[in-house]
Amino acid sequence: MATLQPRVLLHAALLTLGCLAGTAPWAQAQTVLAISAYPAVDEIAKAAIAVFKKKHPEVDVKITSRAFADHHTAMTTALSTASNLPDVMVLEYGYVGRFAEGGGLEDLGAAPYNLQAQQARIVPFAYRQGSTSAGKLVAMPTDIGPGTLLYRTDVLKKAGLTEADLTQSWDSYVASGVKIKAATGAYLMAHARDIKDIMIRADIKPGEGLYLDKTGKVLVDTPRFVRAFELAKKVREQKLDGKITSWSNEWSEGFKRGTIATQMSGAWLAGHLSTWLAPDTKGQWRAAQLPEKAFGSWGGSFYSIPKGAKNKALAAEFIQMMTLTPELQLAAFKAQDAFPALLDVHNDAFFEQPIDFLGGQKARLLWREAARKITAVDVHKLDPIADEIINTELDKVLDQGKDVRAALADAKALIERRAKR
């Protein structure tokens, strides 16, 4: 008995410590729900943790945040190696195709998730973006990027122009740039690539993808791309762009100093301008629909569950909470300018409120209209590669004088070669 006494005492001591800590020391470790995200989706998710923990106080929610490119690189590695996988993976639209067709993500539309039943509540084009060519929903949309034209009113006034001069057509938009440059010295846009980026995304026909259609046919030599390349070339030839890369210091300085007159992007850029890119330019910007009443999307965030995730049921609950709870979708819109993918929110009075940064303009109504008119676009696993190839060929057109149709023919051949691998 004497030899057993130390063990009994130790057992009693551990029991006492466990009770003082609120749990026995041999109790199961707290479940951890691992989420990987990028800014500002990480902040949106963090703000919602308290809501999730009210239902699951036993779950510790851990959010790993990385810079945009680093995040997607890490997720690519995690899926390819089936290691260090999170339970919830956030993806930006440009990466959904690659991840969706790779087979490493759960089908959220099917049982036990059954999110296909919620399809009618989601902006149609966004739901389609999160689906594979076979119709499997592998990424649930949470925010979207309706395309918009942001412009400086002070610069336009000096040039004697109106919004209609910018938006009547793509040709009138470029012609306005000539007048702007002559009257103010300001560039029409940061980079000629910007007009290509929007034009190839605008008014895509049903059944088409951005670069490839649902049958795998490469589309980069179609009139949509030809016109986009030709207008980008015209912008460069007339020195209407500053050859300024997005997200560079020179880019933000151009917005602050009024040396960049317009910027085409997702609606979310207005929020970035007001909060950190150029907050001192408040009241000098306005938003408009894209030229020729074109409607296209630019960006958007999605939630997904890797097939190798450890806590899929909890992950599904978190995703449903973030994407289907009107209060959380609206809170994200107000705090981070994350335009909601949930249609339930689109009739909220917040859309009617004037935006101070945009001179009191009710721009959210414009963006809501665009969101309703954007065509659903199929995603493809080769989209990121095709994007790189197209940008390389456009650079050859802009910087080396390469013929537009020759550049697009070469781009098509390269993409087709990659598709056969």
Image (tube, rainbow, N blue to C red):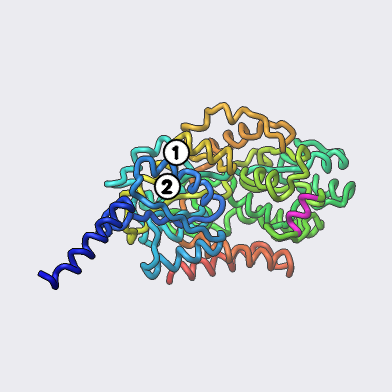
Residue 148 locus on image (x, y percent): 65, 42
Q: Is residue 36 left or right of residue 13?
A: right
Secondary structure, mark 2, is strand
- Disc 1 or 2, which lies upstream in sequence? 1
Residue at 59% of width from left, 30% of height from top? Answer: 351
Q: Are marks 1 and 2 in contact (CB under 8 Å)?
A: yes
Residue 70 locus on image (x, y percent): 54, 64
Quadrant occupied by the N terminus? bottom left
Q: Is residue 22 visible?
A: yes
Quadrant assignment, res 393: bottom right
Q: Is residue 132 visible?
A: no
Q: Is residue 130 left or right of residue 330?
A: left
Secondary structure, mark 1, is loop
Q: Is residue 53 left or right of residue 153?
A: left
The answer to whether residue 420 is above or below residue 260 is below
Residue underneath mark 1: 122
Residue 142 locus on image (x, y percent): 48, 44
Looking at the image, which is closer to me, 236 or 271? 271
Q: Name the amino acid type tagged 1.
A: Ile
Q: Main secondary structure of the magenta part?
A: helix
Q: Crowdedness of circle 2 by 10 Å Cα count: few (<14), some, many (20+)?
A: many
Quadrant assignment, res 15: bottom left
Quadrant occupied by the C terminus? bottom left
Residue at 66% of width from left, 41% of height from top? Answer: 290
Residue underneath mark 2: 140
Q: Which residues are magenta?
A: 250-256
Q: Name the amino acid type tagged 2.
A: Met
Looking at the image, which is closer to me, 146 or 174? 146
Q: Crowdedness of circle 1 by 10 Å Cα count: few (<14), some, many (20+)?
A: many
